[in-house]
Image: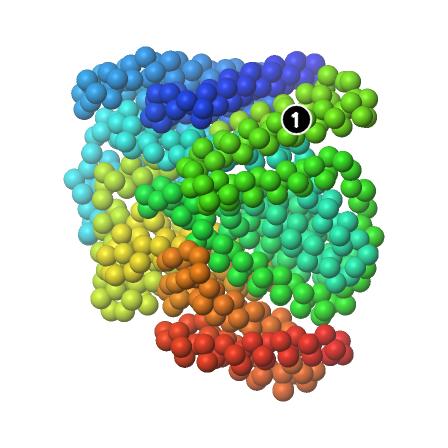
């Protein structure tokens, strides 16, 4: 039986890489030529991603593990057969379905399209159960809406309408613009991230940050924060980054004197920041650009100021924690920097700098910029890897092909899983569209705005918070944007302000109590209580909460990029640093004297950030900054 299991696992591995190579080649051809357009790409590539995600689970033994080894293999082959037939049929009948049989699709059209949607939902059931339940609830609501009382009542729709809406209509469902975006614009950026991962960029960044902090107790916590930020910008997921870097940074922080809860909270806050850091911001930033009809660089250019406020706010809080906990020098078990480590770090800087230059200076389209950076980066790293292999006399075929297979694996798995997630969101948006849920929720928002704009913002935050408790960042952003953004904009708020607010709420969803996935990962690594870790991380992530309000009080922070952001940036940064000190620092060893002083600092810091008159806020900024600097200088000398 063990032999059969090994043979089947090996066969799954081969099938996965063959499919991954075909997927990589097909998308690379599209990035270079744009042949057929994004809709044709989606109807052929979405079924391919279905094959990839199920084969990936199969080769790791994660596809229906209770059924043994043979049954999952047969099921995976069945799923892949259905998906490949669907890709071939939809490609062959593309113009017929989209043009000539529009609205009068035959039974085969609906069966093939419905099969793809069903496979997408089955993967979602296994991977994103909360999103699966939401989709099922919306589908049932679309069919049986006549049973729902009140303002959400509607006559109900037949199942044929549901199946067409989630598949062959192509303007909604599993082939709509969201999965198209995942395969085109986001996929081109994933190529850049995949080549960095394939050649060990993440390991090199962690090694470099550990070497910087090798013997310095003051720089070690900051090196951990910087390393996590840099890697999170590449990983694109707070929870994934926490699992990757937390295993290295958390034990070092604990050895340096941080309590386990604090070490886990530091890694949680740092990992979360990668979602904000341009130019490789999280998936929600791509969705924001698409939803607003703007270029991705327009989002990135505005995202630098909030990202720097978050980074500096977290770094300052960690510096205060290091002083409080008597951080001591440790000698982490870290190897010396090698040739490929320096090459990988240089490659990371080239990727970041190249994307900024091509998108910001030459104003090239984002997809073309990413493809150009990938080609140069791939060539540079391949040559460097070849030089290193010759110098080290590495002639093993396995070692020579390892980074290239990792490239295929990383690109195929990340793009495949992302595309399936976005296809699932396509089903969700289809149900929203045909049932009119956003309009009905918008009525409630407008009623809140009639009372007070602040009430409307609170209602929007509460909606996003509840969605974020069960969904990843991208679904949280898109659902909240669809439901609340049009009505907040109609109430007179700037679109950039509204969408950055929703973006920040979506990022906060990875931390939102009581279901923080990122805190769950870091607490497990640190062997710390989950609830205490989550609450400590919320305090450290205070800059994120501050910016949710600051985008309304200081709209210049995101409305116009460049010099126009600087005054708002300065005010929010000063206030954020002061709030960090009020939460983590101390003015005086006696609590009776210290607490009123910190409350007073928090008061003037809040006025600096939120006072509606910028000139009055600037008056508060000067004493806020002076008190913060004086408090930080004194805090280092207080007895512990």
Residue drawn at (51%, 26%) of the image: 53
The quadrant holding residue 240 is: top right
How many tags in the picture? 1
For this orientation, the residue located farthest to the bottom is 593
Q: Which of the pair 484/632 is nearer the observer?
A: 632
- In which quadrant is the C terminus drawn? bottom right
Position of residue 517 relative to residue 260, above or below, is: above
Q: Which of the pair 587/188 is nearer the observer?
A: 188
Give how far across and how far down residue 284 sits, in percent: 43, 45
Give how far across and how far down residue 446 sits, in percent: 23, 60
Position of residue 318 relative to residue 348, above or below, is: below
Is residue 61 visible from the viewing direction of this image? no
Give how far across and how far down residue 72 sits, in percent: 54, 20
Position of residue 124 relative to residue 636, above or below, is: above
Give how far across and how far down residue 66 sits, in percent: 57, 26
Horizontally, residue 3 falls left or right of residue 310, namely right
Position of residue 98 relative to residue 345, above or below, is: above
Q: Which of the pair 179/192 is nearer the observer?
A: 192
For this orientation, the residue located farthest to the left is 155
Horizontally, residue 364 falls left or right of residue 492, namely right
- In which quadrant is the N terminus drawn? top right
Is disc 1 surrounded by few (<14), some (14 to 19) or many (20+) residues within 10 Å?
A: some
Residue drawn at (53%, 50%) of the image: 277
Residue drawn at (26%, 17%) of the image: 95
Is residue 274 visible from the viewing direction of this image? yes
Residue drawn at (81%, 22%) of the image: 393
- Please say which color scheme the image uses: rainbow
Residue at disc 1, secondary structure: helix
Horizontally, residue 234 falls left or right of residue 148, namely right
Instruction: Identify residue for label 1.
Output: 382
């Amino acid at each position: 039986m063990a032999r059969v299991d090994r043979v089947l696992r090996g066969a799954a591995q081969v099938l996965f890489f063959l499919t991954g190579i075909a997927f990589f080649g097909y998308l690379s051809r599209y990035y270079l030529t744009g042949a057929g357009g994004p809709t044709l790409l989606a109807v052929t590539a979405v079924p391919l991603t279905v094959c990839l995600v199920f084969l990936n689970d199969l080769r790791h033994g994660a596809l229906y593990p209770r059924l043994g080894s043979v049954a999952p293999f047969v099921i995976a082959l069945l799923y892949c057969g259905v998906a490949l037939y669907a890709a071939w049929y939809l490609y062959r009948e593309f113009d017929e379905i989209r043009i000539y049989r529009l609205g009068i699709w035959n039974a085969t059209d609906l069966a093939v399209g419905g099969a793809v949607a069903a496979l997408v939902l089955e993967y979602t059931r296994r991977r994103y159960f909360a999103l699966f339940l939401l989709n099922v609830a919306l589908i049932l609501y679309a069919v049986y809406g006549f049973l729902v009382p009140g303002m959400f009542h509607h006559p109900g729709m037949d199942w044929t309408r549901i199946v067409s809406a989630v598949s062959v209509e192509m303007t909604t469902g599993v082939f709509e613009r969201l999965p198209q975006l995942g395969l085109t614009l986001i996929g081109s950026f994933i190529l850049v991230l995949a080549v960095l991962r394939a050649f060990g960029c993440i390991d090199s960044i962690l090694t470099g940050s550990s070497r910087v902090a090798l013997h310095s107790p003051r720089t070690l916590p900051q090196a951990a924060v910087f390393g996590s930020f840099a890697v999170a910008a590449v990983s694109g997921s707070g929870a994934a980054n926490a699992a990757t870097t937390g295993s290295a940074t958390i034990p070092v922080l604990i050895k340096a004197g941080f309590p386990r809860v604090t070490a886990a909270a530091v890694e949680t806050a740092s990992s979360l920041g990668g979602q904000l850091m341009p130019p490789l911001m999280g998936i929600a930033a791509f969705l924001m650009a698409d939803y607003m009809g703007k270029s991705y660089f327009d989002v990135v250019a505005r995202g630098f100021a909030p990202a720097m406020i978050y980074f500096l706010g977290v770094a300052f809080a960690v510096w205060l924690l290091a002083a409080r906990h008597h951080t001591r020098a440790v000698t982490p078990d870290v190897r010396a920097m090698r040739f490929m480590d320096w090459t990988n770090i240089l490659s990371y800087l080239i990727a970041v700098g190249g994307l900024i230059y091509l998108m910001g200076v030459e104003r090239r389209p984002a997809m073309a910029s990413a493809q150009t950076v990938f080609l140069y980066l791939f060539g540079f790293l391949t040559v460097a890897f070849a030089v290193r292999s010759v110098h080290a006399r590495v002639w093993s075929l396995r070692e020579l092909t390892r980074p290239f297979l990792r490239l295929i694996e990383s690109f195929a798995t990340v793009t495949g899983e992302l595309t399936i997630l976005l296809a699932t969101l396509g089903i969700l948006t289809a149900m929203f569209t045909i049932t009119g849920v956003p309009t009905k929720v918008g009525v409630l928002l407008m009623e809140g705005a009639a009372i007070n704009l602040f009430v409307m913002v609170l209602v929007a935050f509460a909606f996003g918070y509840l969605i974020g408790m069960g969904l990843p960042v991208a679904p949280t952003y898109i659902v909240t944007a669809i439901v609340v953004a049009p009505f907040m904009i109609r109430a007179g708020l700037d679109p950039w302000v509204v969408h950055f607010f929703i973006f920040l709420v979506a990022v906060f969803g990875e931390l939102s109590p009581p279901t923080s996935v990122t805190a769950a990962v870091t607490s497990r690594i640190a062997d710390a209580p989950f609830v205490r870790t989550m609450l400590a991380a919320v305090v450290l992530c205070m800059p994120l909460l501050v910016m949710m309000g600051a985008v309304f009080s200081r709209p210049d922070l995101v409305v116009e990029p460049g010099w126009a952001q600087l005054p708002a940036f300065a005010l929010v940064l000063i206030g954020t640093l002061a709030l960090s000190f009020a939460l983590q620092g101390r003015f005086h060893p006696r609590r009776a004297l210290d607490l009123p002083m910190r409350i007073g600092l928090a008061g003037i810091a809040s006025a600096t950030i939120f006072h509606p008159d910028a000139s009055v806020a600037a008056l508060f900024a000067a004493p806020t900054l002076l008190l913060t600097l004086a408090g930080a200088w004194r805090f280092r000398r207080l007895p512990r």
